[in-house]
Image (cartoon, rainbow, N blue to C red):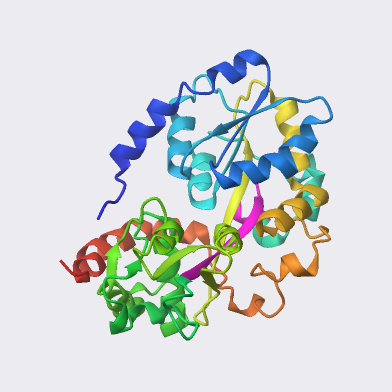
Amino acid sequence: MRIWTSALLGMAGIAAAALPAAAQQSGAMTLMAYAGIFRENYNDVVVKPFQASGAPVQYVEGGTSAQMLGMLRAQKADPQIDVVIMDVTTAALACAEGLVEKMPAAAWPILSQIDPQARAAGGECGPGVMFDHLVMVYDTQAVKPAPTRFMAMADASQRGAVGFAAPPNIQGLAITAILAQAQAQDWRNIGAAMASLKAIAANTQTFDPKPDGYTMILNGQLRFATGWNARAQLYRDQSQGRIGVVLPEEGTIFQINTINVVANAKNRARAAAFVNHALSAEPQKAFTERMFYGPTNTTAQVSPEAMQRTALAPEFRNRVIALDWEEMLKLRDGWNQRWRREVIAAAPR
């Protein structure tokens, strides 16, 4: 059982701080975002079309959002990054610390096209650039019939077969809120979620699936895990249906990735142009159809087939819990402590 500590994250951010220097020396605008399949797909359908206009972009893999925040902090006096895509909880900290620019609506007309929830998520700084949502993934060969609820992970037959991400991972915070809402109609009421969380923990093999829950299912190490829809949908396709993806009946929450111009960016004009591009309808449509993140631009004309595989599909919208991430930040430390004392302690030894 391995859980990141703030000290380790800080060290990772500092160690990574020098990586983009070569990019700045080349004169390219520097985008920091996620690695792996996210980079492959985002680069193809969003970055490359922008570069076609003659504006070079250096894509820097930032690791987790927490590691990206560490990098921005380490570089505050001399930023080497121009634009950053990171999850809403860490982006809120970056905004509060002045590490990214504020984005007033008067200076950014593109914001009038952005979904109100995505705009609100960014506060005074950059808005949501894509919606993802929490899902349950499972091994379709080993789990029959197909499950419909998160609590399928608590069934006694699944002892030792569950990968269940714990806080500070945002997935742990998300499922806590979902189960609290299901039990008490109040996502803030962690006490209402405790019995369900402990029941799932009793079947949990790992609270930190490595390299991820999808791979551990494909390797036969797990039968269930929590995950994010966009990656889960890609793994479902790549595994020819071995990975099953469920938006559970208890509900889900949007995990919102924000896009921000870094404060005092060296290539500020090109950074602003890229942010406008990334938020515009056509790149949003292209990325949703490629990787099944929900678009935040309300004018994007996404194919019905792709939209059906997101929580923005009409039949799923009523399962999305309206969660205030600013309030979640205030609750986070207390929730982390209760997880350590009560949930993780309920796991088999």
Q: Residue at x 48, y 44 (%)?
A: 65
In the picture, residue 115 is in which quadrant? Answer: bottom right
349 over 153 or under it: above or below: above
For the residue pair 24 and 276, the one nearer the viewer reads as 24
Q: Residue at x 45, y 25 (%)?
A: 17
Q: Residue furthest top?
A: 25
For the residue pair 23 and 254, the one nearer the viewer reads as 23
262 over 179 or under it: above or below: above
Q: Is residue 134 magenta?
A: yes
- Residue 326 in the image, given as x and y percentages of width and height: 50, 57
- Residue 195 in the image, given as x and y percentages of width and height: 29, 80
Image side of residue 268 versus residue 90, left or right: right
For the residue pair 302 and 104, the one nearer the viewer reads as 302
Q: Is residue 194 magenta?
A: no
Tally the marks.
0
Q: Residue at x 19, y 70 (%)?
A: 348
In the picture, residue 256 is in which quadrant? Answer: bottom right
Q: Quadrant of the N terminus?
A: bottom left
> What span is colored magenta in the figure?
119-137
- Residue 310 in the image, given as x and y percentages of width and height: 65, 67
